[in-house]
Image (cartoon, coloured by chain):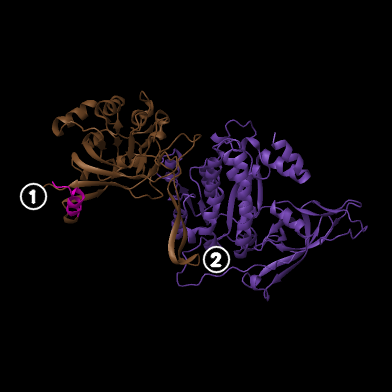
């Protein structure tokens, strides 16, 4: 490897040796958003209203006004999102260090367990098992929980029952452990939140939010195409909108994957 | 005898849709006293405060004693038919399409003689008739005379159907299936003979209890409709806009907020988006097609009902945002009414007091049960009303607003 790393990188991209995988769901009005008890404040869903479409309001151009909550569609959670991260420096999306927007990913495949149990919880032993096969998680890596949940849509995706949402996620201990013992940069899921659907009943409640943001780490949710990533080695590009004092934002999440050498 | 209204056949797609025409619209400002009475289903004539005699037509001074103390007061609804005219030919474009048309002179029990439209069953000269004031397709008040006793298929009389908005054989869209009013409205409309009832449901991925109930009902179709999404409303209008003859907008979004709370602006925006902007989107998508179908046969498009809070008339502090939103909806509804009138579509404001539902849980009785609201709406459609006040609270506010709006404002603001 010589000094021209980016030149090599550009060549690999051009030749297809590095594949770009889009981990983003399409922002559309009917994509489910997180539901809070109705007397609490709610996230606005994604909405698009036309300004003009080559018509009387703008003869040659097409454009729209958009509205949505910060936590809509495939989105990024900054530390300021949770009370545990409220006093940290650089805790909002506008102050987020740009270097943190590009980081390697470990993908833990729990799709079978999630398929069998909507309330599947990732535990430390699951991660240790993954490490036995793939090596220790390197510091400042994303840990992405693959559940194939993104292949569901609508009611099955939200999976709201009378006692709340039932979607897979991490248990409390694994989140504490990943942050404290593995120094991860963030945790990503295919479901509406980084936490499990029933995580309000955990101790602490919403442990992914609690531990990640309390340590200045990040969350990614509503990811898709995790089944196109290798367990280890993908690079994640996740750059949220630069919203002043923003707690998160919808974003385009890309993964760079090196094709296995065939020769 | 009135024959039963035949069940309408499917429309011939090769036939041009008849365009709506309106009956003559000129009225004096005084005569709008009749418009007011007709809109709320009362029978009122000018009555002299000096000599106590009723007068007609509307005028500035009593024809008996020349007093100027003429005010519209409720009058007895009885009368006797003096003469009957069956019009076979006319040059008026609207009535030409409804020939023959019966009119008659009626001697009112309260004194004056008036020209009235006649129900087919009300007999010949000398017959006793029951009078009402009705709004015609142009929204103007006219006298209508019908038989004092019920006759078979009375509500199917073709002249009466021009003055009412009967759900019989009509297709209805209820905008919010999650509303506690939805099931009650569906039941009342089915009982009234509605041909089909579309029930809009937003965010189908959020479950709700009544869904299975609605889906199991015959003649009910649950459709995607999210009033906060322009695309959703327009897509539904593309699918079923030309099949909706009565639209009942039940959209509401009651959320508590204090004016001085930092988050009140978000709540207000959210509530306005569901209610005011929702009605706006609904109007833009369904208004044009309904207006164009105002004369589409005996079961053409006929009415648009907005279920509104009576607190829109006077802000109730406990439901401040709700009151603001419904005040805006009321204004928008008047705008819509002016637009839809061109197509002979009646816009009905059903102003209700607090409903007996979860969001008004802390409000003491009297509250309006969903069934009471549904029955009042269907009654308003059948009678061709324009403003309906539902429940004791709404009726009380209506009466007191007539009397002293300032007192209502102060008392509601406590």
Subunit that carries the residue with mark 1 = A
Q: Is residue B292 above or below residue B182?
A: below
Q: Secondary structure at mark 2?
A: helix
Whether residue A153 sits left or right of residue B61 in the image: it is left
Residue B274, x across and y down, in percent: 52, 46
Residue B351, x across and y down, in percent: 64, 46
Residue drawn at the location 41% of the way across and 32% of the way down: A82
Please say whether residue A115 is one of the residues in the magenta stretch. no
Q: Viewer-proximal residue, B86 or B127? A: B86
Residue topped by disc 1: A262
The stretch of residues the image draws in magenta is A1-13
Q: Viewer-proximal residue, A175 or B35? A: A175
The image quadrant that residue B14 belongs to is: bottom left
In the image, farthest residue toward the top = A203
The dot on residue A91 is none
Give chain B's shade. Answer: purple
The image quadrant that residue B154 belongs to is: bottom right
């Amino acid at each position: 490897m010589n000094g021209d790393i980016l030149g090599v990188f550009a060549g690999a991209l051009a030749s297809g040796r590095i594949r770009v995988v889009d981990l983003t769901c399409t922002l559309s009005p009917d994509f489910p958003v997180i539901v809070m008890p109705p007397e609490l404040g709610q996230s606005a869903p994604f909405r698009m209203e036309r300004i003009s479409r080559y018509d009387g309001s703008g003869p040659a151009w097409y454009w729209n006004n958009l509205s949505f909550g910060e936590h809509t569609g495939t989105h990024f959670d900054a530390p300021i999102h949770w009370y545990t991260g409220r006093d940290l420096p650089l805790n909002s999306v506008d102050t987020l260090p740009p270097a943190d927007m590009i980081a390697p990913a470990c993908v833990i495949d729990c799709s079978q367990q999630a398929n069998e149990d909507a309330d599947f919880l990732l535990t430390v032993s699951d991660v240790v098992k993954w490490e036995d096969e793939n090596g220790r998680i390197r510091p400042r890596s994303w840990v992405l929980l693959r559940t194939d949940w993104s292949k569901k849509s609508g009611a099955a995706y939200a999976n709201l029952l009378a006692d709340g949402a039932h979607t897979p996620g991490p248990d409390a201990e694994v989140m504490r452990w990943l942050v404290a013992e593995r120094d991860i940069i963030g945790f990503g899921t295919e479901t509406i939140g980084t936490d499990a659907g029933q995580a309000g009943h955990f101790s602490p409640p919403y442990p992914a939010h609690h531990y990640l943001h309390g340590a200045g780490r990040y969350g990614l949710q509503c990811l898709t195409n995790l089944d196109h990533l290798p367990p280890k080695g993908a690079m994640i590009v996740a750059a949220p909108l630069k919203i002043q004092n923003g707690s998160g934002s919808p974003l385009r999440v890309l993964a760079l994957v090196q094709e296995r050498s065939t020769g | 005898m009135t024959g039963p209204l035949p069940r309408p056949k499917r429309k011939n797609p090769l036939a041009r849709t008849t365009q709506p025409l309106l009956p003559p619209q000129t009225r004096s400002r005084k005569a709008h006293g009749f418009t007011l009475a007709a809109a709320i289903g009362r029978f009122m004539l000018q009555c002299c405060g000096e000599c106590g005699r009723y007068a007609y037509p509307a005028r500035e001074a009593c024809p008996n004693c020349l007093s100027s103390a003429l005010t519209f007061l409720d009058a007895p609804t009885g009368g006797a038919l003096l003469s009957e005219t069956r019009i076979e030919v006319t040059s008026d474009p609207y009535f030409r399409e409804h020939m023959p048309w019966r009119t008659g002179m009626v001697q009112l029990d309260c004194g004056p003689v008036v020209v009235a439209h006649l129900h087919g069953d009300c007999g010949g000269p000398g017959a006793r008739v029951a009078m009402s004031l009705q709004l015609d397709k142009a929204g103007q008040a006219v006298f209508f005379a019908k038989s004092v006793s019920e006759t078979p298929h009375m509500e199917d009389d073709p002249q009466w159907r021009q003055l009412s908005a009967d759900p019989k054989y009509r297709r209805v869209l209820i905008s919010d299936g999650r509303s506690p009013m939805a099931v009650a409205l569906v039941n009342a409309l089915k009982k009234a003979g509605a041909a089909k009832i579309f029930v809009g449901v937003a965010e189908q991925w959020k479950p709700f209890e009544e869904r299975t109930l609605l889906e199991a009902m015959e003649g009910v179709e649950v459709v995607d409709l999210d009033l906060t999404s322009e695309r959703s409303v327009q897509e539904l209008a593309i699918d079923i806009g030309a099949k909706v003859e009565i639209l009942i907008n039940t959209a509401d979004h009651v959320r508590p907020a204090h004016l001085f709370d930092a988050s009140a602006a978000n709540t207000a925006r959210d509530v306005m988006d569901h209610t005011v902007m929702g009605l706006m989107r609904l109007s833009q998508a369904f208004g044009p097609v309904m207006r164009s179908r105002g004369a589409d046969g005996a079961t053409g498009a006929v009415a648009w009902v907005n279920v509104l809070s009576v607190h829109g008339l006077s802000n109730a502090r406990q439901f401040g945002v709700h009151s603001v939103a419904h005040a805006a909806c009321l204004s928008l509804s008047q705008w819509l009414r002016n637009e839809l009138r061109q197509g002979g579509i009646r816009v009905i404001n059903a102003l209700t007091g607090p409903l007996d539902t979860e969001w008004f849980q802390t409000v003491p009785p009297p509250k309006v049960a969903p069934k009471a609201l549904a029955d009042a709406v269907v009654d308003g459609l059948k009678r061709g009303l324009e403003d309906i006040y539902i429940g004791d609270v709404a009726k009380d506010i209506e009466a007191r607003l007539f009397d002293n709006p300032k007192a209502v404002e102060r008392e509601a603001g406590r």
